[in-house]
Amino acid sequence: MKKYLLSGLLNTLLLAGSVVVFAQPVAAPDLNTQISAAEAGDSAAQFNMGNRYLSGDGVIADDYEAARWFRKAADQDNNNAQYNLGVMYMQGKGVIADLNEAITWFRRAAELGDPPAQFTLATLYANGKGVAQDPVQAHLWFTLAASSGDRAAAANLVLYQEMMSNEQVAESQSLAAEWIEKFNSQRAAAEADDDTAARLP
């Protein structure tokens, strides 16, 4: 599971939140097996290699190498790697700081249903950081993150909603319902494809 810390969001109402990426515990095979799998294109192994380089687990800590492995996994739609890469671009850790690139990776992970990325997008929209301030989009992403059990998103959703008009809340809730329906349909189709592929000789 991802370890992450999102702090500093609420100070009076909503102020700029900061995001910190932490290496995740690696319950992986030995290093050589992990490297072989990562080099063969296994996105989970690539993500684990990124974590190894981030924390110095079995390798010399190297933020550049961590970002390189996260990118390989992120390019294969590994939402954990996409989120971590977004944080690295936001902080300029292992890469040149680039808020637009960070937002791109957060959005990709958020669209895959990643609650920390959804929460991060919500705070960016709430604060107008790197994107136009948009209460409807902020509320949408807080709602989606909260619906996945993110407590900070749930708390912020309640506070943020107090600052919105009834029309804005209704629009956001409609967008959230559409997003959830589309996400569930795509997930069901992907699972059906996996089942079909598993049955083919």
Image: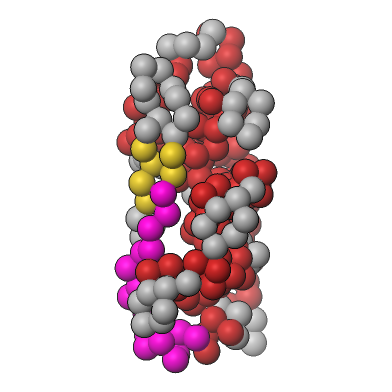
Regarding residue 150, the answer to whether it shows in the image is yes
Q: Is residue 162 magenta?
A: no
The image quadrant where one finds the N terminus is bottom left
Picture coordinates of residue 80, whole percent (x, y): 49, 59
Q: Is residue 27 magenta?
A: yes
**Residue at left offset 54%, top offset 37%:** 121
Picture coordinates of residue 42, whole percent (x, y): 55, 78
Viewer-closest of 20 and 159: 20
Highlighted range, magenta: 20-35
The image quadrant where one finds the C terminus is bottom right
Picture coordinates of residue 94, whole percent (x, y): 54, 62
Viewer-closest of 160 and 71: 71
What sort of colour scheme is used for the picture?
secondary structure
The answer to whether 50 appears left or right of 101 in the picture is left
**Residue at left offset 43%, top offset 12%:** 162
Picture coordinates of residue 138, whole percent (x, y): 54, 27
Image vertical order of residue 148 relative to residue 26, above or below? above
Viewer-closest of 20 and 73: 20
**Residue at left offset 45%, top offset 25%:** 15
Image vertical order of residue 50 relative to residue 118, above or below? below
